[in-house]
Image: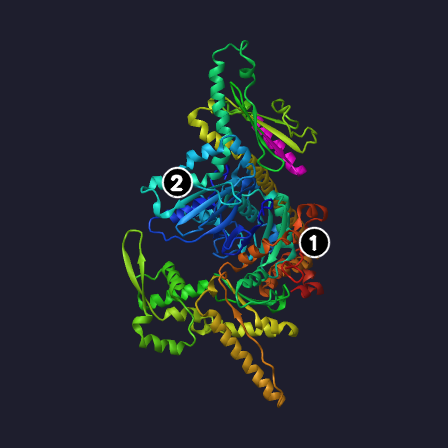
Amino acid sequence: MLLLDYQNVLIESLLRDRFVPGASPVSIDQVVSDFDGVTFHISTPETKSKILVSIHVKCFSELVQYGAQAVLEREYGPYIVAPESGYDFSVQIDLEDLPEDQEARDDLMRRVSLLKRNAMAAPFEQAFDEFHQLQEEASKYTSESAPQGVKEGGEVRAIHYREEEAIYIKASHDRVTVIFSTVFREETDRIFGKVFLQEFVDARRRAIQNAPQVLFLNEPPLELQGIPGINTSGSGEIGYITFVLFPRHLTNQRRAEVISHIQTFRDYFHYHIKASKAYIHSRMRKRTADFLQGTFKFRFVDVCVLTEIQSYVVPDLKQRRRSARQLVEGHSRFNRDFRNSTCVSQCI
Amino acid sequence: MANQTPAVVMDNGTGYSKLGFAGNDSPSFVFPTAISTKSPAGGAGGSGSGRPAVANKPSFLTGGAGPGSHLHGKRGTEDLDFFIGDEALSASAGPGYGIQYPIRHGQIDNWDLMERFWSNSIFKYLRVEPEDHYFLLTEPPLNPPENRENTAEIMFESFNCAGLYIAVQAVLALAASWTSSKVHDRSLTGTVIDSGAGVTHVIPVAEGYVIGSSIKSVPIAGRDITNFVQSLLRDRGEPDSSLATAERIKEEYCYVSPDIVKEFARFDREADDRFRKHTVNYPNGKSVQVDVGYERFLAPEIFFNPEIYSSDFLTPLPNIVDTVIQTSPIDVRRGLYKNIVLSGGSTLYKDFGRRLQRDIRHLVDARIQASEARSGGAKSGGLDVQVISHKRQRHGPWFGGSLLGQTPEFRSYCHTKAEYDEIGPSIVRRFALLGGPGST
């Protein structure tokens, strides 16, 4: 798995099971988490055939400010119900009132499982729209004569989607800049992250010319100057990752895909740091095993240690004896006298 | 709850992994503990003997890397090219992928694979950032502390999870029984009968601690019952006697009878009422009818009369339970008899608990009478035997974990990342007893 999924697998599989024609409805009541502190509540409060999916997003008020309501209404129109208490947004699906053909059903299933993605997509969509506006505006002027507003670009949209981390989006007439601030609690993670991001930065230079430009800084980039709530201590714990999206990424055909991709960036990034650590661990295990194999070959005393360790792992006495005997037989090639030593006979 | 993320509860068993969030009454995901990687199947036992080679070294020393895995040759993202769970099964059916099972006999056998299995469980299925969540994992009874340390290393160092608690499955199964109306005091003393697909364990637990020396296992479990049903179907020459059909029949029609002789008579008397027909539908649209007869009560009967199925294991389950309790320390035996808790899919047969309770009570009463007779006039106060079946039996350990993981004090029982960094892996050798005396 290189990329993370955008949809919630649980919602998808739950709905898929129930959308099959002839499937009998079953009651559900599950509270599940998603990335970035998002909580879903999937339940059947009234009857078994009415599935209520509610979402709680930490930064929902900010998202609403950037037009989340409109995006959600566009995506879920007739399914929206009043939000359940404690949650920000709810959709209800009546299994007895599903679209007839299979394609529409699949589409509904996909939409609902993308609830988090769609909620978070609003500020991006708004910024992309603003970019198109500014682009049009800017085409009327030459680069010198453009008025201040057009040159500078729009305001910065900040989404504080996690406790200490945020996404900042800024549209201007020739680009959209997306900045992630991310915190590394661990020294190791910071190093992995740096190496990883360097690859991102270099990707454009090397092979992939179409990629967005990526910058990585330890202090807030220029775009964020003057924004309240920015930590300028420069302690190195917070990193700022800047993506510069060019007009080719912002076309209407690409738009949905780009938003999905960039949204999952933070989790993707942390997932890969963790996967790299797992990979390095497996190499470390292999190396340790090789070393141990080497040492065990020659030192008799290890037979006793090993049998003792083995008694933890191999509860079956017969197998334990057999493996001990095998080991000792191997050793006796080096020294025939070992067989007589009392220690060995105790082991066996 | 608004600010606190729910704890992640993961119960990785030999056969199936149960994943979900604390506070729910059923796991979000249940799938086989299988991983398919892009390599020729199974590093171990490649000699073609059909049996894995006897390891001359405990698995945690070889790290399960196995011979001939050329890690140094892998420079790309091959390590991410794998599937877990049901996807693994379907991927291994095609070319290029080999399937492996990282857990054997309840214990983690291959740490490399397990680490990747967890990584995918967390990021693909549960979709959580482990830094934000506490984790509750399970382990089998008598799990060596080294295994626990390895688990902690992976959880804290690879995943940076916020906090970790590792609980013994049997203890969680006891906690799960608190939902039953028969349980009045929330004690962690009792005998757990855990019967899954491969093996049945009888585990005595006193005040939350497993009495390791008295654990007994019975080599009869779900898979044997399925095989038995299948052999009965084959003997009769039914039109479909595949393993899948046998399993469906086992799950849908089987129950435990109070007395087989009477049950046979009843089947002959009320044939219409007792015999059933099972319809098997094939993907190509055809269907056949399979008669379901005596196997309805004979199949689960192999727990109580193993001689009808196996020729080498002959001790009935009630006797095993009795022996287990009799070999436990004398001061906890009363509690163990009073609270016999069922867990696992193979204990779900109707009236399984009732039959077990009756049979154990007969054994106990017989023993009391004998000793009364020997003592010449002394009267015993009697012994209370109670078998508890409840609604959450199937995923008992997971549900117990979910129950305990949602309590407000759960986090204070966990070891946190900071504590781990301070002390090291040895910190997980001991955990305070969750749900024990002192907590709610």
Q: Secondary structure at mark 1?
A: loop
Q: Does B136 appear above or below B438?
A: above
Residue A100 spot, x, y in % from top left: 31, 43
Q: Does B74 appear above or below A45?
A: above
Asked if both marks, 2 and 1, belong to the same chain, the answer given is yes
Number of callouts:
2
The earlier-in-sequence mark between 2 and 1 is: 2
- Nearest the eye: B150 or A121: A121
Which residue is painted at 31% across and 51% down in the image?
B283
Q: Does B189 appear above or below A151?
A: below
Q: Is residue A71 visible?
A: yes
Residue B171 found in image quarter = bottom right
Q: Is residue B327 visible?
A: no
Closer to the eye: label 2 or 1: 2
Instruction: Using the image, tell me which numbered label, if any, was put on residue B188.
Output: none
Which amino acid type is marked by label 1? Answer: Arg
**Render colour scheme:** rainbow
Instruction: Using the image, tell me which numbered label, if any, was put on residue A299.
Output: 1
Which amino acid type is marked by label 2? Answer: Leu
- Nearest the eye: B239 or A99: A99
Residue A217 spot, x, y in % from top left: 63, 27
Q: Which residues are magenta?
A: A180-201
Q: Residues within 10 Å of mark 2 (few under 14, many from 20)?
A: many
- Callout 1: residue from which chain? A
Residue B125 spot, x, y in % from top left: 50, 45
Which residue is painted at 36% across and 71% down in the image?
B294
Please give the residue where the numbered disc 2 appears in the rendered image.
Answer: A108
Q: Secondary structure at mark 2?
A: helix
**Callout 2–callout 1 Cβ contact below 8 Å:** no
